[in-house]
Amino acid sequence: MKTAYRTHTCGELTREHAGQTVRLAGWVDSSRDHGGLIFIDLRDRYGTTQCVFNPEVAREAHALAEEMHGQDVVRLEGTVSPRPAAAVNPKIPTGAIEVRVTVAEVLAKSAPPPITVADDCDAGEDVRLRYRYLDLRRPCMQRNLLVRHEIIQAMRRTLEGERFIEVETPLLTKSTPEGARDFLVPSRINPGRFYALPQSPQLFKQILMVSGFDRYYQIARCLRDEDLRADRQPEFTQLDIEMAFIAEDDVLGVTERVVAAVVKAVKGVDLATPFPRLSFADAMRDYGSDKPDRRFEMKLADVAEVARASEFRIFRQAAEAGGHVRGLKVPGGPGAPGLTRKDIDTLTAFAADFGAKGLAWMRVEAESLTGPIAKFFKPDQLAAMQKTFAAKEGDLLLFVADAPAVVAASLGALRVHLGHRLGLVPQEELNFCWVTDFPLFEWDVEEKRHVAIHHPFTSPKPEDLDRLESEPLSVRARAYDLVLNGVELGGGSIRIHRPDVQEHVFRLLGIGKEEAEEKFGFLLEALRYGAPPHGGIALGLDRFVRLLVGASSIREVIAFPKTQRAQCMMSGAPGTVDERQLRDLHIRLRPEAKGEAAGAPATPPAPQE
């Protein structure tokens, strides 16, 4: 690291360097005047070093230190000296030494920072994003981005060892329906035509397989114009993988080796592989979710059979109408945090947010089920329900009776909510699993047509092909999702490589031949020239980093993220453009759009000193 400005970083000096003359450069982290001696902690991304200014040793340097303030950029030269035993700081690698400064130079002064450049910064997120260059100086943010770098390097090393090659695919491409809204880019050279920014490299990586590159990967930038939340950004990064002449086990195996290498590099933990596999049906049955958090039990259970024979009208009618009557057990007993009637009312409102019309409950007391609905069940029915849940004294049973999707969504969310609230989730555990055998299609009630669960290029299971026309909703996809701690880390599938099957799937999705040729003609044409069986997966890099560092949002692991309104607080994007630029693109704004643009946030003002 030796340069004209520094011979060492602020994180590497130890007692072994005692007596050496060194140069350091960085930011003033803190300054303390101890009645003559001035102590300055100098920081760079490698760490912090304590530097001592003594007026009797270097008067000019000491005078300069009196004028130094937080976030000033300085260069210091001095001698490494061991600290007295009582002054050793074991919490940092450089805590056993200090640098006695003989020469100092201020390279750049800093205005008073509007946020605290420290891990305990209490500024709001919008302020932190506005001054992102200061926010990124905080040690925790630098650690996050360093972990991100380590993860990417571990991915690349592993895939290179697996004989993959990295290929870049276009960022300016054609708009194709892939589930989310495209970002469109007008073409100046081709008036009236638009590029689309890629939602994923899906079509191009399939064409690479047709081209004979049987093992491709890319750290790919993807863009989707969709509403945002904590785990979504308009631009995001994924590890994109595609392989030819393979089946599901091949893709899953490579992915597990990549993930294991990443976790080993970042956490020092050896993951057990292969990861457990659950079918979509089993995941929905046991957890009410296709991204189950398996770090704790509390599985859902079915009581429809008892419900049909009971006198509880709500349960009985739901079961008879083909709905689900299901429940979960909240552990009680000695030492368990019991839930009060007020707590249950709060949980009822929580479940209503997911469509549940009500939340019924019973509790085990004196070895029997009691509660408002217990009177509608005969003793043998109560005993059967207690046995179904293996419920013991103090346990609480919560029930929802409704359409299958509502029951799964409400109880699945309630399970996760209670798991965290009651402290049942081991926070340090990394629990991976695969969810497989997804349905190929679902029915869109509003549009009255079949839509693809994943995307229209996902292959149906060969054993289900004969039902593709007659029972499309029963056809399973050769698709798989990787789940980590209840978060979908990524997903993929074996692709359709036969043009006749691809065209058949398009027809079932309501994509006619003319539209298919217009939107996907280049892929369909490529498939006609001999496409190998192929498949792949994409892992969300931002989500993976967030989970490994324990951040609350992917904005904490992206250098320059957008807000939930898709704005960059630092640069002021999106911004307006002048009329000449619009004329060059053959675009005219509607009057109301001009007004909206005029009211949009301008580039933020420069900070005042």
Image (cartoon, grey):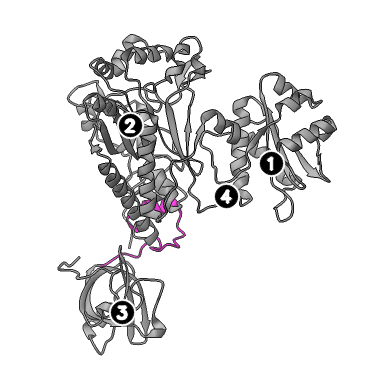
The secondary element bearing badge 1 is classed as strand
Three-letter code, disc 2: Ser
CA–CA distance between discs 1 and 4?
15 Å
Answer whether residue 562 is visible to the viewer in this image. no
Earlier residue among tags 1 and 2: 2
Q: Which residue is mark 3?
A: 98
Front position among marks 4 and 3? 4
Q: Which residue is mark 2?
A: 200
Three-letter code, disc 4: Val
Residue 75's place in the image compared with 195, above or below, is: below
CA–CA distance between discs 3 and 1?
58 Å
**Range of residues picked out in magenta:** 109-135
Front position among marks 2 and 4? 4
Q: Which residue is mark 4?
A: 425
Earlier residue among tags 1 and 4: 1
Front position among marks 3 and 1? 1
